[in-house]
Image: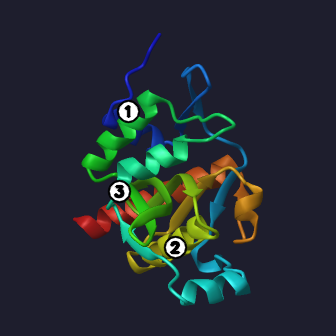
Amino acid sequence: MDIELTPELLIHAYSQGIFPMADDDAQLYWFSPDPRAIFDLDDFHVPRTLRQFYRQKPFELSIDRAFEQVIDACADRTEGTWISRQIRDAYIRLHELGFAHSIEAWKDGELVGGLYGVAIGGAFCGESMFHRATNASKVCLVYLVERLRACGFSLLDTQFTTEHLEQFNIKEIPREEYLRRLSEATAIARLLQE
């Protein structure tokens, strides 16, 4: 049975700690990993050489300027992608409603890196990132963390641990703890918005 990925369904799923992925045949699956990989925003670690590179402002950085280009670049992988056409279109709808966001890195007017994810309350759930220039996606991640801190977010969910993310002090926590933190993050944001 095909399920339509409506914005309402996706927001409900994310608020319960669940997210979709597709296989190579575009079959949709739902995940809630245990353990769950997150970044504690206060303990986010930027390696020294990357910190120095970041301070040089090697890229022009933007927010939500090229969401569709970012998700398309994230889906454009030689080893296959979990971003099916259905997922792409659903996240573009989420973006139009203000729940999905992208960070972009530009060099000489060309998009060379980026990431995107879903923001619900004070939680940001990172979905995917890409780079076409050295360190471009890493610079986007550092910028994202700066923005999340400045905006009062309390949770950055990365879903799974990857070798690429380990250098930033990624943590794995039990699903139960993740769901508690997720609930707190969304509740705090609702209080701030009222």
Q: Give the camera-side residue of 1 and 133.
A: 133
In percent of width and height, residue 34 lies at: 71, 44
In percent of width and height, residue 88 lies at: 42, 37
Q: Earlier in the sequence, mark 2 or mark 3?
A: 3
Q: Residue furthest front?
A: 108
Q: Earlier in the sequence, mark 1 or mark 2?
A: 1
Query: Badge 1: how crowded within 10 Å, few (<14), some, or many (20+)?
Result: few
Secondary structure beneath disc 1? helix
Q: Residue furthest left?
A: 194
Secondary structure beneath disc 3? loop
Count of numbered tags: 3
Q: Earlier in the sequence, mark 1 or mark 3?
A: 1
Left or right for 142, reference 92: right
Left or right for 160, reference 57: right
Q: Label 2 belongs to which residue?
A: 145
Q: Give the camera-side residue of 134 and 126.
A: 134
Q: Are marks 1 and 3 in contact (CB under 8 Å)?
A: no
* Amino acid type of the residue tagged 2 in the rendering: Val
Residue 59: mark = none
Residue displayed at 58% across by 34% down: 82
Q: Label 3 belongs to which residue?
A: 66
